[in-house]
């Protein structure tokens, strides 16, 4: 997911997915245009979960960079049929002293999200005593396109990428010899990982700690029909059929009354803003309450708010990284 830019048409605050900067633009409308536009939004509102006829922004990303240990097996992206990218490992059989950690990125991103210059999560773990044998990340949808113009960004959904995550997690455990792993996921990576565990319940025993950062566990504001209608017409961004609030996909994943939100022996920690500073989870949309600000929370998890941080800051800010590093090391 990209951090939206805010525009204020029709006296409302709307997010526009366009890069990672935030700004505000106020447009002047003739009164009748303003009235008609507002009425259209109110008419569309009740149908926000209706199915769109066309999904946009699903495209084939370039091949992602590969920086695994030389003897790590070559894995294939199941959707695009090229090599699965990412980084991690030293040598098969090399000793490890911490449970291996797998990092799972969000939409339009790749494994490099966890090793950005000046705010590298990987480096923070190395500084804390982890080795490269214990740190892993995959690129499950090719190379990141987040820095391209919006029309050229390639989005994906959770379902097509579950096989890639399964094969990668199995390969890491086989390569390291560790019976358990920890996982740190951001944005789309959170429901992707949760659905993998739901479909492959052996991971409820194999994953010791699950850090879920800014994940759309109960949907995202930017997949609501009123938002989509304003920007892309009667269409969906790729993956919005899964992530619109109250979707059948999420209801099945979360279970009746949230009974499947944090199942198994895995320990769960969520990291999220909870105030609307993360524009993917707004309390209000078009002056109407939607209450999405606590969507990332999971019933049965340790739910940790970090108010005021935006979508990407929740992944890399020291206030967040120190909390989730402490969490996954508590039983090390």
Image (cartoon, rainbow, N blue to C red):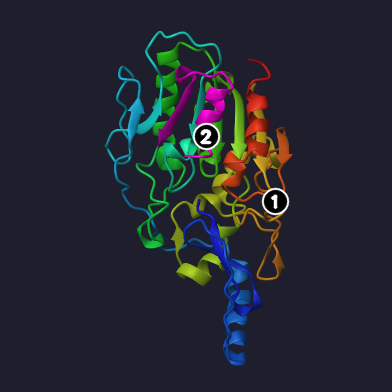
Q: Is residue 197 visible?
A: no
Q: Is residue 137 magenta?
A: yes
- In the picture of the structure, the residue carrying the numbered disc 1 is 308
- For image coordinates 41% across by 53% down, the residue present is 147
Residue 52 shown left or right of residue 258 in the figure: left
Quarter of the figure that contains the C terminus: top right
State the image coordinates of residue 68 (x, y, percent, origin top left).
36, 25
Q: Badge 1, how many Cα within 10 Å: few under 14, some, many 20+?
A: some
Residue 278 shown left or right of residue 230 in the figure: right
Q: Is residue 190 visible?
A: yes
Tag 1, which secondary structure? loop
Q: Quadrant of residue 285?
A: bottom right
- Which of the two residues, 77 or 21, is positioned nearer the viewer here? 21
State the image coordinates of residue 204 (x, y, percent, origin top left).
58, 23
Above or below 302: residue 266: above
- For image coordinates 31% across by 17% down, the residue present is 71
Write down the region rendered in magenta.
117-139
State the image coordinates of residue 253 (x, y, percent, origin top left).
58, 39
Q: Badge 2, how many Cα within 10 Å: few under 14, some, many 20+?
A: many
How far is the residue under mark 2 from the one under mark 1?
26 Å
- For image coordinates 53% across by 39% down, the residue present is 119
Q: Quadrant of residue 276?
A: bottom right
Above or below 169: residue 220: below
Above or below 40: residue 241: above
State the image coordinates of residue 39 (x, y, percent, origin top left).
62, 81
Q: Nearer the viewer, mark 2 or mark 1?
A: 1
- In the picture of the structure, the residue carrying the numbered disc 2 is 193
- Which of the two residues, 132 or 246, is positioned nearer the viewer here? 132
Residue 311 shown left or right of residue 91 in the figure: right
């Amino acid at each position: 997911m990209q951090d939206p830019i805010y525009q204020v048409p029709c006296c409302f605050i709307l997010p526009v997915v366009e890069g990672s900067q935030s700004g505000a633009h106020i447009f002047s409308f003739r009164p009748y245009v303003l009235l008609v536009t507002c009425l259209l939004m109110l008419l569309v509102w009740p149908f926000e979960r209706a199915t769109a006829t066309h999904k946009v922004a699903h495209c084939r990303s370039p091949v992602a960079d590969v920086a695994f240990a030389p003897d790590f097996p070559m894995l294939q992206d199941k959707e695009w049929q090229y090599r699965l990218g990412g980084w991690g490992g030293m040598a098969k059989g090399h000793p490890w002293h911490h449970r291996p950690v797998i990092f799972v990125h969000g939409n339009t991103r790749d494994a490099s999200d966890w090793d950005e210059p000046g705010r590298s999560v990987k480096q923070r773990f190395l500084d804390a005593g982890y080795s490269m044998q214990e740190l892993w990340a995959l690129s499950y949808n090719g190379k990141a396109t987040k820095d391209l113009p919006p029309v050229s960004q390639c989005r994906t959904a959770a379902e097509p990428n579950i096989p890639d995550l399964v094969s990668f997690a199995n390969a890491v455990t086989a390569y390291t010899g560790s019976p358990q792993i920890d996982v740190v996921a951001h944005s789309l990576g959170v429901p992707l990982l949760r659905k993998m565990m739901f479909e492959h319940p052996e991971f409820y025993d194999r994953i010791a700690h699950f850090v879920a950062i800014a994940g759309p566990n109960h949907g995202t504001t930017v997949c609501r029909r009123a938002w989509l209608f304003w920007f892309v017409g009667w269409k969906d961004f790729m993956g919005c059929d899964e992530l619109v609030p109250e979707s059948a996909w999420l209801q099945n994943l979360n279970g009746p009354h949230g009974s499947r939100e944090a199942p198994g022996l895995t320990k769960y920690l969520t990291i999220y803003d909870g105030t609307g500073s993360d524009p993917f989870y707004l309390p209000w949309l078009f002056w109407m309450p939607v209450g999405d600000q606590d969507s990332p929370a999971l019933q049965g998890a340790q739910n940790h708010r970090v108010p005021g941080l935006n979508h990407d800051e929740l992944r890399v800010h020291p206030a967040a990284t120190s909390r989730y590093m402490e969490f996954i090391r508590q039983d090390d």
